[in-house]
Image (tube, grey):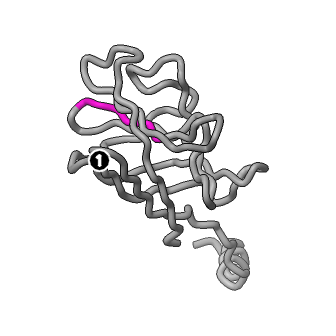
Amino acid sequence: MRASAIPLLVTLALSPARQVAAAPVWYWAYQGAGVTAHGRLTTDPQPDARGSYRVTGITGTRNGVAIVRLAAAGRPIPGNAPYRVDNRLRPGRSPLTEAGLGYALADGSYASPFRKRHGGQMLEYLSAPPLRNGRGIEVTIRFTIRRLR
């Protein structure tokens, strides 16, 4: 090691560590007629100006079927065009947005829990193969989130 590099290493070793915000982890769950889903979500560390957190990852199950991935924000889940998901959550009584959360399941279906525009009712849209637009099942749900860390 060159002698000129030693003071730099000593300075870096003694300087305070930069605090890097860890991604929050949330427990989520919802139930409705014939549906039970739950798991964990990760989000950006800080909420946006409206107090919503952008979901960056999802794990869990829906009626015992594994969730395999988060749907792309800004696009509809297959079988639910033109309704685009935004994958944003807000702590409180009404955690879902109107655009909702979208995810894919191991059986080839897609689910999207969301908040209805008028009245604040929460619903889930399930799109199952052959994934034809507007042919999915919509049920009223009770959706909750709780921050774990």
Q: Which residues are magenta?
A: 108-113
Seen at 61% across and 44% down, the residue is 120
**Above or below, comparing residue 104 to residue 18 in the picture:** above
Q: From the viewer's perspective, tell me whether residue 84 is left or right of residue 113.
A: right
Q: Position of residue 69 (x, y in %)?
A: 37, 41
Residue 86: name its quadrant: top right
Residue extending furthest toward the top = 132
Task: Decide which of 16, 89 is in the foreground and name it.
Answer: 89
Q: From the viewer's perspective, tell me whether residue 85 is left or right of residue 112.
A: right
State the quadrant of the N terminus: bottom right
Residue 10: name its quadrant: bottom right
Three-letter amino acid code of the residue under disc 1: Arg
Q: Mark 1 highlights which residue?
A: 62
Q: Position of residue 23 (x, y in %)?
A: 55, 61
- The kind of secondary structure element at disc 1 is strand
**Above or below, comparing residue 26 to residue 133 in the picture:** below
Task: Decide which of 45, 37 is in the foreground and name it.
Answer: 37
Seen at 25% across and 22% down, the residue is 129
- Please tell me how crowded label 1 is: few (under 14), some (14-19), or many (20+) other residues with Cα within 10 Å: some
Task: Decide which of 48, 82 is in the foreground and name it.
Answer: 82
Seen at 31% across and 51% down, the residue is 36
Q: Position of residue 106 (x, y in %)?
A: 23, 38
Residue 109: name its quadrant: top left
Is 109 a magenta residue?
A: yes
Is 53 a magenta residue?
A: no
